[in-house]
Image: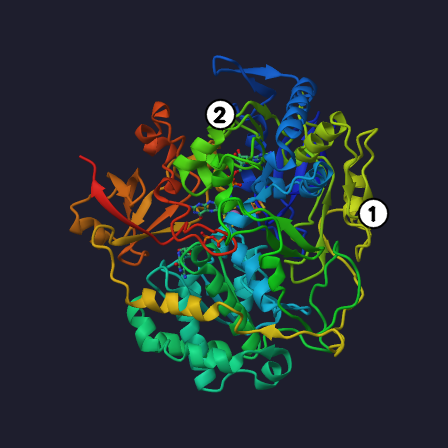
Amino acid sequence: MAAKTVKTYCRFCHAYCPMEATVEDNRLISLVPDTSNEVYGGYTCIKGRQLIEQIDHPTRLQQSQKKQPDGSFAAIGSEQALDEIAAQLQAILDQYGPRSIASYNGTYSYQNSAAHDVARAFHSAIGSPSYYTSVTIDQPAKVAIGPTRMGWWNGGSHMWNDSDVALIIGNNTLVSHYSIPGGIPSFSPHNALREGKQRGMKLICIDPRVTEVASRSDLHLQVRPGHDAAVVAAIIAVIIAEKLYDKAFCDEHTEGLQQLAKQTLRYTPEAVGAAAGVPASQIVEAARVFAGATRGTAVTGTGPEMGPHPNLLQHLVQVLNAICGRHYRAGERLPNPGVLTPAGPRAAQATGPQPQWLTEGVKSRVSEDICETVVLSPYGPLKEMPTAVISDEMLLEGDGQIKALICVGGNPLLAWPDQQKAHRALAGLDLLVCIDLRMSATAQMADYILAPKLCLEREDVTLLTDIWHDKPYSQYTRTVVEAEGDKIEEWEFFWAVAKRMGLALTLPNGPIDMENKPAKFDLLANITHGSRVPLETIYNTEGGAVFDVPDVILEPADPATQGRLQLFPPGLDEELAAAYADLQAATDPNYPMLLVSRRMKNTYNSTGPELSLLKRKGTTNPAFVHPQELSARGIADGEIVEVYSRHGAIPAVATASDDIKPGAISMSHCWGGSPDPAAHADDKVREIGSNTNRLIDNRERSERYSGMARQSSIPVAIRKLS
Ligand SMILES: Nc1nc2c(c(=O)[nH]1)N[C@H]1C(S)=C(S)[C@@H](COP(=O)(O)OP(=O)(O)OC[C@H]3O[C@@H](n4cnc5c(=O)[nH]c(N)nc54)[C@H](O)[C@@H]3O)O[C@H]1N2
Ligand SMILES: Nc1nc2c(c(=O)[nH]1)N[C@H]1C(S)=C(S)[C@@H](COP(=O)(O)OP(=O)(O)OC[C@H]3O[C@@H](n4cnc5c(=O)[nH]c(N)nc54)[C@H](O)[C@@H]3O)O[C@H]1N2
Ligand code: SF4
Ligand SMILES: [Mo]
């Protein structure tokens, strides 16, 4: 058959870069950037260029696997595996009740545009609240707790493309391709940054590392990790003292400003600067530059959200945007009202706080302070149980204990905080099923591993990123190559198991055909029913495109329904006091350094290290440390050291790096192997890296409401290993 070139998009990460694939006899012979795409301008990264190799990689599971009594694995047909799994789930359901069946939907569940909705439908059908995702160990303060406590603005915050300032706190989009709107766009981020700077945009970055973003910023506060809430409180205090805030917006749409002003007063730039290791003048300048501009948003990434006081930090960042009035107003046109999200008018008004969401949901069995989180989405509030304490839920005996876990495109043994506990929890399950392309560290513990189709082997639409773009952009991709052998999609698993259990699955817009497996397009059409642009139009458009959606001009607030943004919700005084106390807290001399997280270009969490181009960039997650810290300890660059905390110890390859603040250690997560001594993972640190979650006690200083563990800013020490 003659070779054919088709347009598609990469789903190695969530940037969804458009690509052109050439296929001959169902084999992918080339994959190149789609240079005709007006939004991405031909951008792709090294990971996307590995998709061809990934399809045929020797470590890819070509068939589903079943664990044998002797611990080895044997191939099993997927229909047979689904029969056995459905029967076991039914037995567990009958014996222990719905809550005992949990799913954990990791990063690759997000890349399949139908996976979450069908998984949620399965949970509804069996009545199980035990729906877990990686979001609740990622940034729950931002997507759930923050807006719940303050309320939110229905017109959205200023986006990058029409801003003259951005304040970026612990978010390195040039590597991660991740930001919420307002930060550097995830799509072709280098171009977006260049374009913003040409426009005269001012960039302020707060990060303990001179990151790719920090080095291109106008002002970089190279902070000691862990004091971001205090830094933002000080910025707010300066803005209020110098009357740089938007008084009219505050009067009309917020409450609690007086209390906020009073309670942030003691956060002087001097006091905060001394603790955070930056000059007071930089904090004042950050405040003046941010508030002095006319438009632009403060955004956070994972670094500070995983550090101390994430709920407080996120609240203060929202406050900063609110008091500076960085929201679209009545009469303004929304840059992107959404393509796949439901159509409808939008008003320039606030929805007030929803404090009942913090306490009303299903309670964690582990702590009274923690309960189901409510994640805000364009489709309304979505409930999720907090992954930060899932291991505890699995280990705690009694009614509601999790007995079966379905792990979709996630790698809990490497990703969940407190690796030893995660190991015990996974080992204690009656049934562990993974849908994973390879024998990941978690899959090696599973009873069944289902072999999935990879992204170019399936249809998808850019649902996840629909409102992250600053234009109404979308892309539908057909299947580029048919998967060979016996492979399934993530949603098909839930559908097939439900069918065997005699369940009827329903999506928010209608039932799923349980007789005949639905076509992916039909499922997606159901999921996106009522979208601004019909799915069919996107399906029939070749490649990604900006769609001609009618302008959405924000309507004036309706006095009958508008709420106020609560700047000083209950409990904030205690949180402010705790963050203030931290400013004075002495460093523990036994653990004088702070370990922070980072992303690396050549991997996506635990995905990628086996691929040849990526492997060439490194096979370990080095402990990046300032050279002066290494020489003070007589450690040579490249030497293996031990990094240890109050909770655990791991080996790491010490790597001298001028860009890290002295006193901090920067290491990537999701590396290494099982903590089981029999796995000898520590002996292979140069080949597989090591797992920072072994240094973390997930219940020590865990955050209220979400249970979020401290996964960054961990007090540690390093020593030579000889
Ligand atoms: N200490 C610390 N811990 C952290 C973090 C941190 O910064 N520090 N970060 C946290 C964050 S933000 C996140 S999101 C989580 C990540 O948590 P997880 O999502 O649990 O971890 P990943 O490594 O992304 O898991 C992805 C899995 O999907 C598999 N996979 C790859 N491609 C496909 C595919 O196409 N289909 C399927 N079905 N599977 C595929 C991979 O082999 C891998 O096993 O980790 C969290 N943990
Ligand atoms: N290449 C690649 N891309 C990825 C991923 C990957 O593993 N590899 N992972 C994906 C996932 S799951 C996510 S959630 C996103 C995350 O996207 P980002 O949030 O942009 O993640 P990082 O690149 O780790 O950037 C976090 C930054 O926070 C800084 N930081 C750490 N601690 C602190 C602190 O206490 N204060 C301040 N101010 N900064 C701090 C770190 O130095 C780092 O520069 O990236 C996604 N994209
Ligand atoms: S940034 Fe890289 S990995 Fe992410 S979608 Fe684009 S090419 Fe793929
Ligand atoms: Mo994440």
Q: Residue furthest top?
A: 70
Q: Is 647 left, or right, of 138 in this rendering?
A: left
Q: Which residue is mark 2?
A: 444
Residue 638: which quarter of the image?
A: top left
Can you give x and y, in whole percent of width and height, for residue 232 in the image? 43, 70
Residue 9: which quarter of the image?
A: top right
Is residue 423 or residue 653 the one in the foreground? Answer: 423
User: Mark 2 or 1, which is nearer the eye?
Assistant: 2
Can you give x and y, in whole percent of width and height, for residue 620 in the image? 37, 37
Q: Mark 2 belongs to which amino acid?
A: Gln
Residue 570 visible in this rendered orientation of the protein: yes
Q: Mark 1 belongs to which amino acid?
A: Glu
First-in-chain label (2 vs 1): 2
Q: Residue at x 43, y 46 (%)?
A: 600
Is residue 232 or residue 202 the one in the foreground? Answer: 232
Q: Which residue is mark 1?
A: 536
Can you give x and y, in whole percent of width and height, for residue 677 in the image? 34, 26
Q: Residue at x 72, y 63 (%)?
A: 337
Residue 292 visible in this rendered orientation of the protein: no
